[in-house]
Amino acid sequence: MSTGTENAGATPAFQKAEASGNATVTQVGRDYTENHHHRYERGWQYLRGVGIDAAELDLAEYAFVDPAGPTGAGQTAWAVSRLTRPHERSHTLVLSGERGTGRRTAALHVLLKAGVDRERLRWLVLDWDQPRTEQIPHTPGHGFVLDLTEYSRLDDDFYTGLGDYQKAAHDDGAFLVILTDEGTWNPQTLTTAPIAHLRRPPAQQVAESHLRHRAPDRLDWLASPPFDTLLTDASQASDAARLAGLIAEADEAGRDAVKQQFTDWRKHLENWFTTHSSADDLRERALLVAAALLEDAPADIVLEAADKLFERVGGELPPGGPLAGRDLRVRLQAVNASVVGEECISLDEERHGLAEAVLKYVWQQRPQLRKVLLEWASQLSAPKGIAVRHIGRIADRLVQLSLLPGGSTVQSVMSEWIETGRTKHRQLAIGVLETMALHPDTGPGVRGWLYDWAKKTTGSGELVSAVAEICAGRLGEKYPRIALTRLRILAERNDDLAGKAVADAVRTLASAPERHLLVVSEIVQWAESADRATRKAGASTFLALTDLTDTSALPLFSTRQRAEDPAAAGIEDLLIRGWQAAIEESSTAAQAHIRLAGWLDSTDLPDAQLMPIAAAVLRGRLREAGAADLLTSSASDLGRTRRKELLHRLVDEQAPAPAASAPHAGDDTFPTQT
């Protein structure tokens, strides 16, 4: 846990963070944002760190292939020495290289060699729109990996901020390894962080090293058919690691299946489609594609989905319906599928990876079928579609297709469905875009779309609600600050539809205890902004969040909830600031007084929690009309009692203190001089 205070003056800020698991952060002192020497006004909130799987750490520690550098030693040996030497030790390090050089594994290897405990290694989740060093944790004894590959350039502030981070990491005994590609890192003279340039390790050596660790008795498999020609000089380290993993997990007699899976079953599928090319085979082709899309779904759903695809491409089902055609067993044999569990159809059960490979093959070999497949998938997963319960699986499959050549079709069709209000397609489109927003390859681009969509002043209501819904879902769970930024932009539109969509979204995000403080603090920051549009958006959103007529709001402010969530201990200060900002904003002042009146009338909020907040909000405002009305009108006995007590407290605070009495002769005490 790291602590620190920022610039002196006014109220000092205190920051606290634990980067392991879910980061918990506390801010005390409302002057922090004004006094902080960085531009980022929410820099106190550290990135969340996630632990590393033990199997991945084993490979980094025991099976790492380190190509020789210019001096003949391993290329990461120099990097380790910079983190471990007794004098001028660095606590930050940059590993630069193209994709496929094994940078992630190299980072873990370096940190392990530098002496960081496995349990204290963390992969940082990039919940930001731009990299900022203030958000990078430096928890004592921890090692962090920060992947900046997705950024084409970095601001000068980031490079200069590394100097401050280096000092904090040195003081706390923390380490940071930054991953970049060769074109991104260009600090010039702004930082002294050492950089190691990585070369791609030989794929054959990587595969051998991994097998030597995982399945040494199968090391000879790599040198014999069918594996001896699979890895070439152009193969990436990830390809080699994948092949070694498949070999290690294969059945003893499953060599051919391993080769087929490694090559995406291409030869198998080429042969299958060649032998099933007649008109009579079209229904079986449709069944193969349906089984691939709905892997491990019930047989009746897969069969009906296959018929719907068959009809979409112009096929006519034979008379007799379910009685027509061949039996299930025969049809499944034709497509190399099997029945698992309670009559679920699977391609992967006996041929691992075949389901994904089928969709890839059809997508690439039959480009004219792409939009048909998307329409068909939407039909299946529509609100009353036969596969609506499998929409998550369908969305995952479509995201995989979006990564292929021609994959932009997926993105453009999903966007079109939302923007043009294609209601029957909306559910799948949102599911696909949500999944794409979280994917390591498509995520940055889709998150950028959501930002641009939120800024559209002429965007449709469907677009507004879709952005809010995606931000309130899995995107907001993993990247809450990114989601809140887009919700803030929506809220600045200042229309009823956007206001309701944002209010619903922030209430959903705030409903998770680990996000209470983060969500409320972000919204209070909006309400205190110097920008008028942002200030109005923040004030109205704050009032929506504190609306106790919505049952989802109450747990956020209940004593029991706060007792269970120590990170929310600072919520009272944020509530006071939020109420004050909402009252000071002319467009929300009247509603703020009404909402606060509702709090004073609420039987769900205890006096010990409510009264100090209300007193702090109304202090110095007794002469204002809104406060006067608030304190003199109530329909309940509880409300009247609270208002009377609150009024007495505020009046007593304003009353002048009695003059000090002159000391009597012989007294040993005298007034203290000030």
Image (cartoon, rainbow, N blue to C red):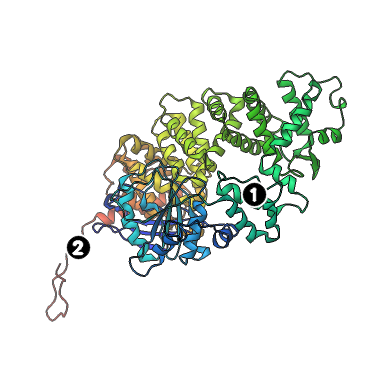
Asked which secondary structure carries label 1, the reply is helix
In this view of the protein, can residue 108 be seen by the observer?
A: yes
In this view of the protein, can residue 643 be seen by the observer?
A: no
Assign the C terminus to one quadrant of the image: bottom left
Q: Earlier in the sequence, mark 2 or mark 1?
A: 1
Assign the N terminus to one quadrant of the image: bottom left
Q: Viewer-nearest of labels 2 and 1?
A: 1
Residue 668 placement: quadrant: bottom left
Q: Is residue 309 left or right of residue 400?
A: right
Q: Is disc 2 surrounded by few (<14), some (14 to 19) or many (20+) residues within 10 Å?
A: few
| Residue 448 coordinates in the image, percent (x, y) | 45, 35
Q: Is residue 288 left or right of residue 206?
A: right
| Residue 653 coordinates in the image, percent (x, y) | 27, 56
Task: Residue type at mark 2: give it.
Answer: Pro
Q: Which residue is mark 2?
A: 658
Q: Which residue is mark 1?
A: 243
| Residue 99 coordinates in the image, percent (x, y) | 50, 45
Asked which secondary structure carries label 2, the reply is loop
- Give the CA separation, mark 2 to mark 1: 85 Å
| Residue 447 coordinates in the image, percent (x, y) | 47, 37
Between 526 and 350, which is closer to the camera in this rendering? 350
Task: Residue type at mark 1: give it.
Answer: Leu
Looking at the image, which residue is at 69% across and 34% down? Answer: 358
Q: Is residue 469 left or right of residue 391?
A: left
